[in-house]
């Protein structure tokens, strides 16, 4: 029996932001292994060059294009758009919006005292996605029978909302909402375009290396995350909630269900982390049945 056509196929074209490292680069590796052409976007030109050199093989016939881009700048996307269209007039087969940043409030300030902390976080983590969609959604949805896909990289922090970094959590929560609406809008008008919300687990990326010089045992590698993503895409999943070496899929489901239960049952905000609720929350999460 012949497998159905996949977006990961020879001759198809992938455009990936945040492509010079981490999950973006691991996705580029997978796409290149499948014989796809690559358009790699990143804010760091030196790392982009390293990524392209690592991928390039003398015997390969696929094309690799790199462009330095600050995804938060709408004008930069607009300047890039005609160049990409001229390179690939038939459109983009895989659009992965993945670039992100982990900002912190200015020294001596709390998140609530530093509006620029919210502005810079949203500029990359949310508007970097809407800018990319505005520039290239039409390119993905051009007519054609072959499957195409859009991947938006979210975060569990945008779903379960742990305390500590409200701007990051809120920016990723917005990505979840954007992805849900995009999937809803395209499912009838462009059924050949799959939309997927990638929600990584604990992954050892460049962001993590700032805090951990070597990979913690609990982390997945970016390559493990991408392998899981590809499998779930093949299964048609919209929500791709990745486990890791510490958290199972079942535990993720329970934590998500408990977080939603705060709203449903009129509990205080973020009960999982409140001292007066922590024991009840832990017991309640353990007792939840998410198998049905």
Image (cartoon, rainbow, N blue to C red):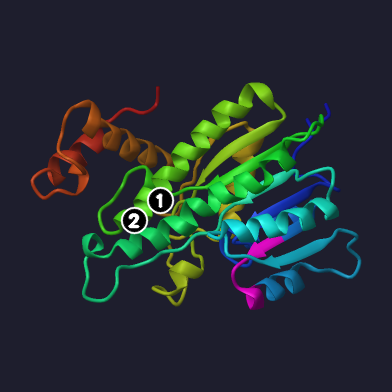
Residue appearing at x 84%, y 55% in the figure: 87
The quadrant in which the C terminus is found is top left
Quarter where residue 211 is shown: bottom left
User: Distance of mark 1 from mark 2, alpha carbons?
Assistant: 6 Å
Q: Percent position (x, y) of residue 158?
A: 38, 46
Q: Please identify the quadrant where the N terminus is shown.
A: top right
Residue indicated by mark 1: 171
Locate residue 43 relative to residue 38 in the image: left or right. Answer: left
Q: Is residue 52 above or below residue 223?
A: below
Q: Quadrant of residue 98?
A: bottom right
Residue 136 higher or lower than 23, as above or below:
above
Which residue has dot 2 on it? 167
Measuring from the top left, give residue 228's x and y in whole percent.
58, 46
Taking the spot 46% from the left edge, 73% from the top edge, the residue there is 209
Q: Are marks 1 and 2 in contact (CB under 8 Å)?
A: yes
Q: From which residue to which does the magenta span run?
A: 40-47
Q: Which mark is residue 223?
A: none
Task: Give SS at disc 1.
Answer: helix
Q: Does residue 41 belong to the magenta stretch?
A: yes
């Amino acid at each position: 029996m012949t497998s159905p056509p996949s977006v990961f196929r020879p001759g198809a074209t992938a455009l990936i932001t945040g492509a010079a490292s981490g999950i973006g680069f691991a996705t580029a590796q997978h796409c290149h292994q499948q014989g796809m052409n690559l358009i790699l976007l990143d804010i760091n030109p030196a790392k982009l060059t390293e990524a392209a050199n690592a991928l390039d093989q003398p015997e390969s016939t696929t094309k690799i294009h790199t462009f330095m881009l600050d995804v938060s700048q709408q004008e930069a996307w607009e300047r890039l758009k005609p160049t990409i269209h001229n390179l690939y007039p038939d459109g983009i087969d895989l659009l992965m919006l993945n670039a992100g940043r982990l900002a912190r409030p200015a020294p001596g300030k709390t998140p609530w005292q530093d509006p620029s902390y919210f502005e810079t976080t949203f500029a990359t983590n949310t508007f970097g996605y809407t800018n990319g969609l505005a520039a290239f959604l039409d390119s993905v949805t051009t007519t054609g029978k072959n499957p195409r896909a859009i991947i938006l990289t979210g975060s569990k922090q945008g779903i379960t909302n742990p305390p500590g970094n409200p701007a990051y959590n809120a920016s990723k929560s917005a990505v979840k909402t954007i992805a849900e609406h995009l999937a809803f809008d395209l499912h009838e008008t462009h059924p050949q375009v799959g939309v997927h919300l990638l929600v990584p687990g604990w992954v050892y990326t460049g962001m993590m290396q700032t805090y951990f010089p070597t990979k913690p045992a609990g982390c997945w590698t970016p390559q493990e995350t991408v392998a899981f993503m590809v499998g779930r895409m093949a299964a048609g999943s919209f929500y791709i909630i990745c486990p890791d070496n510490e958290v199972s899929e079942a535990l993720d489901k329970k934590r998500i269900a408990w977080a939603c239960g705060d709203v449903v049952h009129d509990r205080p905000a973020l009960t999982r982390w409140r001292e007066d609720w922590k024991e009840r929350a832990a017991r309640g999460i353990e007792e939840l049945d998410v198998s049905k």
